[in-house]
Image: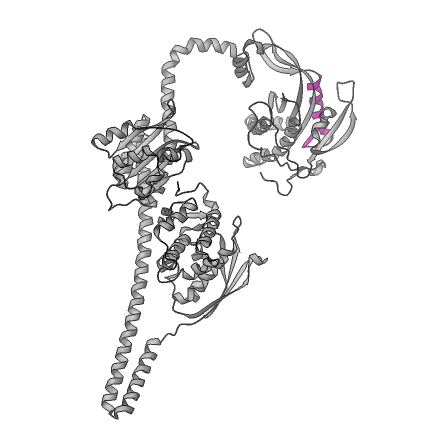
Amino acid sequence: MAESHSQLTYADKFYNVKILKVYVSYLKEKCRWTDDKLEHLFELCGYDITFLDSEDNWFDQELADSFIEKVQKMTGDSRVAYKVGSYAFSAYARGIFGRLIQGFANPQIFFKNVGKNYMAYSRGALLTAVSVSSTTAVLRSTAVEGCEEKPYQCLNRKGMLEAVPPFFGCKKSEIVENKCIHRGDKYCEYLIVWESENLFPSFVTTIAASGSSFVGMLLTTQNLLLSAAIGVGAGVLTSYVLLRQTAKGLRELIGEKDNALQESFRIFNRRYEESVLKQNVILNTFQAHSVDEICFKTANIVKTVMKFDRVLIMLKDSECNVLKTNAAVGFEGNLKEVVEMAEFTIDPTNTTGFFINVYNTGKPLFLRDVQKKMEKLSSRSQQLLKLLGTKAFIVVPIVASGKSVGVMAIENLDESRPLINDDVDILLEIANLMGLVIPNVKNFIAIKKSERLAKSLEEQERQLRKVFQKFIPGEAVSRLQHFGSEFLNVEKRTLDVMFVDIVGFTSFSEKDAPEEVADILDIYIDEVQNTVKNYGGRINKIIGDGLLIYFENIGPNSIRAGYAIMKVCEIINRRLAAKGYPPISIGVGAHRGDCTIGYIGTKERLDYTLIGDTVNVASRLEGYTRKIGPNTFCFSSSLIDDAKDFEHVSKGKVALKGRSKSVEVFQLLNPLKDVKVGPLSTGFNTAAEEPSRFEYAGKINPNFQDSELHPPSGWVN
């Protein structure tokens, strides 16, 4: 079923709906297309033709390409874009684009101000005047970043610019494209040439008509008085005809200005209604104490302010997985009972039930003529619409936190107030407000219920607290609940262990205020925690500015996480700079080996920790980074096989403090070219499902005197 809106952002939409309106006007007048054929064209593009109702609507390059492809195919005319451009200022279509230029006295003035006016038509290119004279203009079109115009759009622009001088009554307008981006130039450049309009046509024509009539009669009749009378009469008649033509042109111009005023008033009225609605909804719904009260108040406000006949709001019942009526305003007698009892099962495969379709897609539906679309609806939808006597209706989704929670539908039985596309936009705004309010009210109700249960749970809570106080790490509680007392066992396992530490933080903490030190640590730990979590890592200990991290699933993720931590140091420093703190540098060390892991401690207090030689080596490797420089990641040869996606350099065998055997140490540098180094599957749910923002890692300069991080070309954060 065709939809009237897309989910793209404002920045993605470069073209105003006026462009499509000119195409529709051209197809109706020149190609004799029927309304049904035009509706079918928009359906093929995935839109409803009611999208044209509001000139506040903009669309993206995808719709532009799809639309012209289908128009060219259906008309068999490859130059239809140029013809539509030339047609834009014709008498039939002048009301659409006339408002852009009707305030200018001649082409010269318009072309000097073309850039500002063109923005009302398209944001896909910047149109500027290079030079303008009384009979020529050189204009330049420069592409906007993010928009890739196609050749047919150049043709359309050429046709439109060429049609401007004739709009002002000038003759022989011609356009030449000196440069074009589709021929390899950096911009498109157009030369428009025209002949100036004769400023005294009426006077010259009148004298010529009078003179020719006088001479002709004098030669024929030899009667001077009669010849003079006929000459004057011919002049008067000619003046009358010319004045009528001038009056007709003035009437057309006044009509166009009236249309522009009406359109401006419509937009102002729409925005006023939207403002009043929002204000009323906010004032009333935030005072509501139940979801049903929110729905009922909102439905009444929408009906009153927008002058709709009926408003229906249905929300999802999570227990039954159905849409149920929460408010029905404007329904009377048996119809009210039918609507209030209505339920619709939420089925992801349902595309013909209009309520469920809107709920599933999260997109509004506007049916201006129900009878034309009746056969495309489900049998139950058809029965309901026939019972209600619905002729046209709008349904919009109510979305909270990116998920549909219900729908709002409106209809008007009074044909004197037809539904328009502006109504869809306003209803979407109100539905968005409801999507913000409803979860808050549900949370408020849930909190109240929790408070009532609190007293009966106090004793159980005290008992649980005694147990949970023994477990410091956050993951301990959930694991204990899942595995039971077996989780308290201590075991020996092979793990990837990592230490992260701030270089020179001790001296910094000695001279700065405690609250500033704590704030810096919060930012640093927050970014490192979020990073290692993506790679399946867990922070086991926070020892001042030092972090002990382990990875349950051994593999490349520990190396990749170490590199990502180095990269995230840039983000940490940006956050610190925003608060006026100095930048930090970090060191990272990693080693793989056997560890003793589990809950160790006394009967009164247990601590989930890991100990052993592996932990000591990782700590010493982090300390060894001080000999190389800040922002350095060192790892042992135990991880060399998992560093194959990176450049690295051996520092040789190093005798680490407190250890008899030396360890071969490597410094991690940069990822290999065109290698993705994001997180691999970790085997448990802490890893992100989508590619990490560190999937394309930047470069770390091994020279510690210049340790900036330089992302390679093509890297996207």
User: Which residue reaches farthest left?
Assistant: 333
Residue at 62% x, 13% y: name it.
598
Observer-nearest of 19 and 432: 19
Lateral position of residue 487 relative to residue 168, left or right:
right
Quadrant placement of the N terminus: top left
Residue 64, percent from left and from top: 46, 50
Q: Is residue 581 visible?
A: no
Residue 171 spot, x, y in % from top left: 42, 71
410 vs 91: above or below:
above
Q: Can residue 681 be seen by looking at this rendering?
A: yes
The secondary structure that most of the magenta stretch takes on is helix
Q: Is residue 359 above or below residue 89?
A: above
**What coloring was used for the rendering?**
one colour
Residue 198 quadrant: bottom left
In reply to whether residue 627 is colored magenta, the answer given is yes
Write the residue at 36% across / 22% down: 445
Residue 347 on image: x %, y %: 40, 29
At 38% from the left and 27% from the top, the residue drawn is 440
Residue 17 on image: x %, y %: 40, 51
> Does the magenta segment cover residue 22?
no
Quadrant where the C terminus sits is top right
**Magenta region, residue range:** 613-634
Between 166 and 593, which is closer to the camera in this rendering?
166
Q: Residue pushed farthest bottom? A: 222
